[in-house]
Structure formats: C-alpha cells, structure tokens
Amino acid sequence: MNPLTQSIISGTMSGAVYALLAVGLVLAFHTSRVVNLAHGESFAVGGLTAATLSEAGQPFYVYVPVAIGASILFLLAIERLLLRPRRTWPTGSLILVTLAAAFLTRGVLQLIMGVDPLSFPRLFAGAPFRLAGGVLPQQGLALIAIGALAAVSVTLFLLFTPLGHRLRAVAENPDAAELLGVNVDRARALAFGIAGALGGLSAVLLVPLVSVDYQAGLGMTLRGFIAAALAGMAPSLAVLAGFGLGLSEALVTNYGGALLQDPIVFLALIGIAVWQSRNIAFGGTGRA
Amino acid sequence: MRLLAAVILVALTNIAHAAEPYVIGIVAPTTGPLTTVGVRQLYAVQWWERTTNAAGGINGRAVQVVHCNDEGSPEKSAACVRDLIAKKSVLLLNASVTGPIRAAMPLVQNGPAMITPSPNIVPDPSSYVFQTSPSDIDLTRAIALFLKRNNTDQLAMLASTDASGEVGVASAAAVFPAEGIKYELARIDLKANDASIQLANIVKPGIKVVFSNYSGGGAAAVVKSYSNLGLTQPLIVSYANISDAFINVIKNDLPKRLLGTGVKAVVPELLDDPAQRKHVEDFMVSYKQMNKDNADMLTLLGLTLADTADAVLRNVKTPDDAAAVRAFLETSVIQSVQTIRWSKTRHVGMTADDVAILEYRNGRWTNADPIQ
C-alpha cells in the first residue's frame, strides 16, 4: 500500500463529510446569524436512527429516508422551538441556546439509543477500487461523489438562485427582507431544513464506514465549524474548506502522526481567525 | 427505670448500627468515549449488589454500591474518589481506564483499598491498590508466545494516543524485540473515525498479523478501516474489546479472522477448575436474566471486582480498617472467574498463564486456531 495515496483517499472521504457539515452550518448562519452548535447532532440523530432501524430489520430504502427525515425534523425543531421565539435575543445568547440544545440532545439520545456505538451495512457494497497503491471502498466513492454533489448543489442554490438570494437577504437585514415580501420565518425554516438534510445525508454515507454513538454530534459540529470558519462563513468557499480540512488532517496524520493532528488543525484555525480579524482589529476599515 | 431505658437505647443503637449497609464505592465511566468499558463492569457489580441483598446481605448487613461517573476523565476520577471516600466507602472499585485510575491512586495512599481490573495498572506493592487482571506485559507476552508458536516474527501494531496506548507501546518495546519479533507501530487518536492511513503505513509486505491495542468503542474505526482496505491478515484486538457490544458494531465488517487477548473465563470450557467454571456459567445465566444482555469479557472483569469485595466483606472482621483489608488481600486467594492471587510483593492478581488468545467464530469467542 502507498501511504500517501491512502492519505489522499481518506482525506477526500473525510473532506466530503466536513463539506456537507460546513455548508449546512453556513446556510443556517446566513439566514439566522447564529452559529448553530447543535448542527452536528443532526449527524448523530440521522446515524442512530438509521442504525436502529437497520438493527430492527428495516431495509435501506426505509431507514435512509427516515434517518434523513429525522435529521431535518431535528433542525427544524431547533429553529421553530428554540430560536424563532427568541429572535430578539442577542446572537451570543442564541449560540449558547444551541449549545444547550446540543447537550440536551446528547442526553436524550443516550437515554433512547443507549451508550454503545452502532453502525449499519454499507449502502454500496462490493470489492474496493485499488488505485496507485491506495484502496477506496465503494461506499467511500459514493460518499465523495454524493457528498460533493450535494454540497456544491446547495452552494450554487444559495449563490445563484432567487430563493438563495432571498435566504441571504434575510441574514443581511431581516426587516428589509420582510418589507420586500420575503417570509423570514419560512426562509429560516427552509435553511435549517436543508442543513438537516445535509447532516442526515452525511450520516447515512459515513456511518457504515465507521460507527456512531450518542456523543458523535459535538465532534462533527467542531469539524464542520472549523471548515466553515476556514471559509470565513462564505458559502462559495465552504466546500473547498471542507475538502481542504479533510486532506490536511490526513496528510498531517501520515507525515506527522496522530499526535500532531489536532494541534496543527487548531493552530491553522487560530492563524486564519487572526488573519480574518485584521479589519476588526483596525476599526473595520482596513489596516492603519 | 432509667437504667432500663439506657439499656434499651444502647441496644437500639447497636441494632441500627448493625443494619447500616456496607458502602462500596465504584468509579466507572458511564458517559464519554469509554462508556462501553465502564457500563458493563458497573452492571456486573450492581448484579452482585442485588443478588447479595436478595440473599440477606453479608453478616446481616446490606451491601450498598455507590457509583460515581468519571466520564473517563482523570480530574473527574480524582473527584469521584474523594467523594466516595467522604461517603465512607469501605472499599473502592475502579472500573475506569489507565489515566483516570492513575489520577485517583495518590488519593488512597492511606486506604481504603482500591481494586481495579485494568491490565495497564501495575500497583506498587506497598500501596492500597490491587489489580485483578494479568498485566499488560503479560497480555503482550501471551501474544508474543502465540506468534512464536505460529512461526511468525513480524507484527503491525496500532496503539491509541492516550495513557492506555502509552502502556501498550511500552509493553511492546519490552516484549517483542526480546522475543525476536519485529513490529511496525502507528498511533491513532481516540476520536478518530478512520485508521486506514495508519494501517497503510504499517501493514507492509511480510506482515502476517495486525494487533490493535485500542480499547473502547472507538476501536471499531480500526476494524472498519481494516475491512475498507480489504486486509486479510488475522487482526488481534485488545483485552477490553472482547464484548458483544463491540462485535455488534463491527458485525458487518468482520475481518476474515478476528482474534483477541482475554482471560480464559470468556470461554468457560478453557477453565480447568469445575468450581470456577460453574461460578462463571451461573453468573452468565443470572446476569442475562437480570440485564437481558449477555455477559462478556468486561462484565467478567466487573465480576472480579464484585468477588473481591464479597470476599473482603465476608472475611475481614473490620472492613473499614484499610490495613486489615490489605493484609487479607495480600495473604488470601480470591476465587473469582479465575484465581486471583496477590502477595506482599505483587498486587497484580493474574499472570500470563491466565491469558488466552481467543478467536471470534460462529458468533462466539473461542480458543484461537493457528495462524496459517
């Protein structure tokens, strides 16, 4: 086996998941101005729902849509029950509300689904592809292809469609958007629903290759948030940042070892945050 | 009249004292990444609490197991031990993992005795800490002997980046070269969900066996990656992964041959002593009735904790006297899932002779077949 090729393959697979999560986070952020720290829970909800239904003998054409539906409903509930009634609260407080929701979800999942990790059979089984000393399972190829397609589609929708423009207008100035006839509540619900669908999709594609348990959500939020932050919360860069994060993590693991992975990723995040905050530090009008 | 009242009062006080339960403290992670390790051991100890109390308790006193969840965190583990000592635990059971157990050890310098099944803990014989399993060195030596019996002198090894992984790395360095076995090593982060890069780095031509000493549910990432890469060598998983919960996660991606290190009691037929075999089989039946779940390696390790506590409470007249408990443990043989024997110079209860190399076949763990 060629470790470099394998790193690129593994990094691309992780990158597809990070891209899906980052696009969902950016989408919700661009309609509500809130970084939803419960976003990764949509991954845990979808993954555990699929695994539990699979365990109960349901076929994939039942558990896949039900799992994605559960993830959509979960984020819609966050928007409708927690954020919408508190829309006048400061953004910082709303972020804390989503963090509380993440921990509450974790507890509920532990009570309902138990503490053991779960998984379910691959949706795309068969002999893996072997290329240049690396191995790519068929499920991995599907993860990369479907993940990239979904993430890019949502990004294009947000950037280039009238509805996408309306969603972004809601974030820029909700009052003005409402005066122009945009239903702000519906726009935010739509954004959270799409974000939930991406979270659920990432779970049904990734979990067969790994496993999922009640505490998987926060780690996914963190990775998605790092990718979104690397993109500067810009929809046009979120997919690229997701794949970039996955690849850089894999290459650090290959050349530096697992012990260096987190320090280097977080160091990069701090560096980019400092770079992006230059305008704020100098009064918002560029460097002095 | 006053004298009679005083006599009655003293008698009532004694009765009340006699009725006070024995408090046994247990530290076990029941949330966090090491949940699968803590929950099963805790259930075994709670099984003992219920069956003992249902049978009238010990010496007319009930047993009260007080649990503290350390979440696998060293800081919380130390706080748990402080709290359990404050609650007057006569004995502490620690079902956590290496880092948290080590963090708690200085707190019992003057007792109470703390019992743990973690093979990574090799307590100082002058301490109040006792370990019920074979040591990690013993487990590693058992793997080395198995490889040598099968004419295999090359191994690929994955170790986690936490304190348990450090112990595994040290044991490998101490055992494998001395036994003439070359090994390739890679580390994996506890939170990682992919081990294919590490495996690509260590599974080189000529490697006939891969060993993962990664404990906990996250080790599924290793097995899944193994399957993703289409590897066919036998894979040996760690002591703490011989569980139904672990098999359940990886059942769709089982390696061609899945091996593991364990105590012989996991396969009761391997036990020579009929009394021990009956003890294990009876426990497995009763545990399943109570918990609607099969007993596995981790529950058996929990049973070693329970059996030790049981022996202390039945045989030490003053179990709240830590020195008396230590003296008893250092001079007695505890009959549990296997024989646990400590001494004044060794606080590790089992040896390499107690270890079996197991193989998962036809839905159950059994004695491993030779490597072909």
Image (cartoon, rainbow, N blue to C red):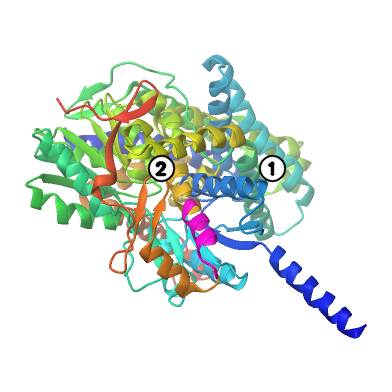
Farthest residue toward the right? B1
Query: Mostly what secondary structure, the magenta segment?
Result: helix
Q: Write down the chain letter for disc 1.
A: A
- In the image, taking residue B210 as reference, residue B344 lies left or right, namely right
Give the position of the C terminus of chain B as an image quadrant: top left
Residue indicated by mark 1? A78
Query: Is label 2 on the same chain as label 1?
Result: no
- Asked if the magenta segment contains residue B83, the reply would be no
Give the position of the N terminus of chain B as an image quadrant: bottom right
Label 1: few (<14), some or many (≥20) within 10 Å?
Answer: many
Q: Is residue B210 visible?
A: yes
- Asked if the magenta segment contains residue B313, the reply would be yes
Quarter of image, res B83: bottom right
Q: Is residue B111 visible?
A: no
**Mark whose residue sits in front, 2 or 1:** 2
Residue B276 lies, with reference to residue A207, above or below; the image says below
- In the image, taking residue B203 as reference, residue A207 lies left or right, namely right
Q: Write down the chain letter for disc 2.
A: B
- In the image, taking residue B39 as reference, residue A91 lies left or right, namely right
Mark 1 falls on what kind of element? helix
Q: x and y percent of residue A79 in the render?
A: 70, 42
> What numbered label is drawn on residue A8?
none
Residue B309 lies, with reference to residue B18, above or below; the image says above
Find the magenta span and give its range: B307-318
